[in-house]
Image (cartoon, rainbow, N blue to C red):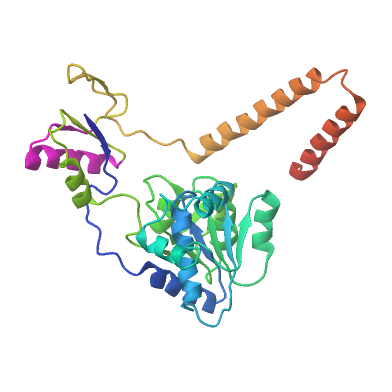
Amino acid sequence: YVVMECTYGDRSHDAPPDYAKELANVIQRTFDRGGNVVIPSFAVGRTQELLYFLRRIKAEGLVKDHGDFPVYVDSPMAVEATNIFKENVVGYYDQEAMELIRRGINPIGVSNLRLSVTSDDSKEINNSAGCKVILSASGMCEAGRIKHHLKHNLWRPECTILFVGYQAEGTLGRAILEGADSVKLFGEEIEVRAEICRLSGISGHADNKGLLRWVQSFSPKPKRVFIVHGESSVCDLFAMRLRDEFGLRATAPYPGARYDLLRNTCLEEGVQEKIRKPSPARRASAVFQRLVDAGKRLAIVIRHNEGGANKDLAKFADQINALCDKWDR
């Protein structure tokens, strides 16, 4: 059996452009008008790939008249992943990157790189003057610190929001990319006035040619191919191609479907209706309930500490009061 994704099962990638030069062009025109380049980026893999391009941009002087501009990586996970790439080169770099290492060059060693770990570090980014590049997660803008950077930059026509990865249907990133006039962030309606663009073709997902080449490499042929991780119409289309053109038994199962792999039979078809994402209001209320539950847990923990050492209780009280001071707004 084979379970495979088909994110780009309905299209072919163009020949890859010179991504460093394309990125440099975006940075150049944005900085020339006094704005920031905000890049929603997946923390692992994509962020490091962009650092690779940014190192080359700076080394070759592809952005003119803006000096050694700052590059911020604002995602604790991305910072951790970047450190792993720095310390473990074998197995993470291709031949081109390994050649740089042999020449004593760090492939993702960007000058004036600033890694933001704490929330205070993150806040300082938007308080700092001057043009900057900001890499932040999540890549589809559904969560994480990127939402704060969107709030501070989306409404500014001099800024650019640059998408460098797939934006799934129903995500905030998809809405912005498809031309939303405004979006809601932290309960506030933010007008979209920044330049919105994408770095086309930069993806970890294979196109339909790559997917077809991969699935045909199995010998003997798989008993069944399950098509997942793609929009419903794309999954159905790709499964049909595998059946009609390549003679494979391919299925794009609906959510909740059940199969007996020993008998290669479907036990339950699953739900065919489109699964609707909860409305922003419902998502917000669910998150608020998490906060309420956390408060209840804190009250229980406080009671558990009754009779503890005065020094520890005082420290605990100070920490709670500091948290209250931070969030009481």
The structure residue drawn at horizontal position 36% and vertical position 46%, both measured from the top left corner, is 169
Q: Is residue 10 visible?
A: no
Please report the bounds of the magenta region as a residue range.
230-252
Q: Is residue 77 visible?
A: yes
Foreground of the two, 284 or 106: 106
The structure residue drawn at horizontal position 20% and vertical position 17%, both measured from the top left corner, is 262
Foreground of the two, 14 or 286: 14
Foreground of the two, 308 or 233: 308
Which residue occupies the extreme bottom position in the image?
Answer: 65
Quadrant including the C terminus? top right
Give the quarter of the image for residue 34.
bottom right
Q: Is residue 215 magenta?
A: no
Q: Is residue 245 magenta?
A: yes
Name the side, left or right, on which 211 lies relative to 20. left
The structure residue drawn at horizontal position 76% and vertical position 42%, both measured from the top left corner, is 328
Q: Main secondary structure of the magenta part?
A: helix
Name the side, left or right, on which 17 lies relative to 53. left
Residue 254 x/y as whole percent:
27, 29
Q: Is residue 55 above or below residue 204?
A: below
Q: Is residue 135 above or below residue 244?
A: below
